Image (cartoon, rainbow, N blue to C red):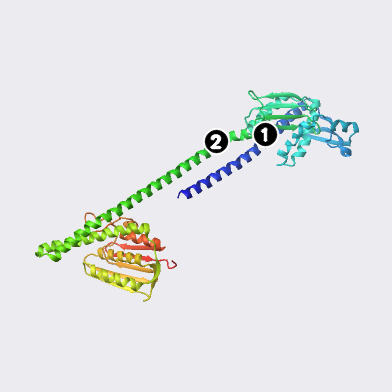
Amino acid sequence: MALIVGIVLFVVFAYQVTWLVMLYHNETTETRRRIQHAVVMADYIELDMRTNQIRQFGTVHGTVTVTSNQTGDSAYVETIKRREHGDSVFYNVQRRPMRSQERDSVNSHPLTWQFEDRRNDSILLAQNPMLGMTYVVQRTTHYSLDQIVPVDFARYDSLLTCQLHEAGLDIQHLTERIDSTGIVIDSIATPGYHRGLQAERFVFFTAIDGLAAYRLTTEPVKSIVLRQMAGILATSAIILIVLMASFWYLIHTVARMRTLDEMKSDFTNNMTHELKTPIAVAYAANDALLNFEEQNEKTRQYLLIGQEQLAKLSEMVEQILNMSMEKRTKRLNIATLMWRDVIDALVEAQRLKSDKPTDITVDITPPNAIVRADRQALSSMVNNLIDNAIKYSGDEAHITISCHNNEIVVSDQGIGIPHSKLPFVFDKFYRVPQGDRHDVKGYGLGLYYVKQMMTQHGGNVEIESDPGKGTTIKLKFNGNN
């Protein structure tokens, strides 16, 4: 039991940890994407606001010249002419080979190595490759507007803060603007922000072939994600603690019940063993008085009654002892048995011991019908069924026993059992309530024993009963045992 519970707990814990790790990695990737998107969108909105500002002053066209980031003969310089017509913006691109002096100036820039994080764009481009063209247009427009209307860096920082807020990221940060030479020319930090050693940078270059850029520095994204997942982590921890506590309580309860059951079994065994000695002594003394002393008729009658009750008591004690021992040590010896060999001896014994007129009809079809069962257990089960049928049959007992291959049916015409009580008749010590009447003595172990033995045989028990009409019990054995 403890091993099964341990395995279940391990599987639940492993699944929960795996799910949390996957969620953490997905959230980390998604958070980095949202931050980079906020940096780009803040620049886009700031560009749009400056474009509207140009419209208000009637500026309708401009010219921009940019260089490529290629080297060798493939390097070039593009001249991009911008023209507005109504609500539309048109760009005319003219390209010429880069001059040697221009190429040397680009290749020898001393701060180029500092901005390897131009690849930051890949966070967004991996999800939408079409953004590459958008970035080219955005950066080209940026270069053109910067010559006409200066960048409002404070406005960009405000827009960036708004974009982060809309993305659910109210985080402290440092915003910097870098010129084409790679020098930081403007910076704004949120109150209380201090850049740590593990801080992460998000850069968006505002030129096609230069170092001009916006750079956002924040606390580690992993810390942000862990803070956002605090509720999920706490809930998962509580669930695991509750599960562990519940399983521990279950194991503790089962162990305690097992201990109580063992104590009860030990008490039953000790009690029955202790009772057998005085019962045997009393029976022997009673038998001696009957056989070796002269008594009057009344005294003899009393002695016979005492002997009868002692015999019943001894039988009950033996039954309880056998029940307890068989439950703990009984090992079935399954064999192929002839129904005829088992039933005839039991029926004859019951006819002899019955204290009332008893008619038992036996039908074995086919005559050589067999059953796969343990002989001793089978004899005890059938004997219990016949004994109950006689006990609960009133003044006369009429019993029918039908045997087929791996099946036996015992029917009587006795007092029957109420339908509401049928589900409980196989419970240990259960006896159908009869008010203040105690016509039939017993401990309620007969049918319990039958049920337990049939379970060990891999078979099942069926019962049908109508009050005043009688009871039918069918035993179906598993012929593959």
Mark 2 or 1, nearer chain start: 1
| Pick the front one: 262 or 244 | 262
The picture places residue 291, in percent across and down from the top left corner, at 14, 66
Instruction: Name the kind of residue labelled 2 in the image.
Output: Gly
Q: Please say if 75 is above or below 458.
A: above
Say whether residue 352 is visible.
yes
Relative placement, left or right, of 277 versus 426 is left
Q: How busy is the neighbourhood of tag 2: few (under 14 within 10 Å), some, or many (20 plus)? A: few
Which mark is in front, 2 or 1? 2
Task: Give the SS element for disc 2.
Answer: helix
| Pick the front one: 69 or 420 | 69
The picture places residue 40, in percent across and down from the top left corner, at 72, 33
Image quarter hosting the C terminus: bottom left
Q: Which mark, by number, is residue 231?
A: 2
- Residue ID at (30%, 58%): 321
Instruction: Name the kind of residue labelled 1 in the image.
Output: Ile
In the rendered image, which quarter is residue 68 located in? top right
Q: Please say if 386 is above or below 166.
A: below
Relative placement, left or right, of 132 versus 355 is right
The picture places residue 425, in percent across and down from the top left corner, at 32, 58
- Residue ID at (76%, 34%): 116
Q: Which residue is mark 1?
A: 35
- Residue ID at (33%, 53%): 265
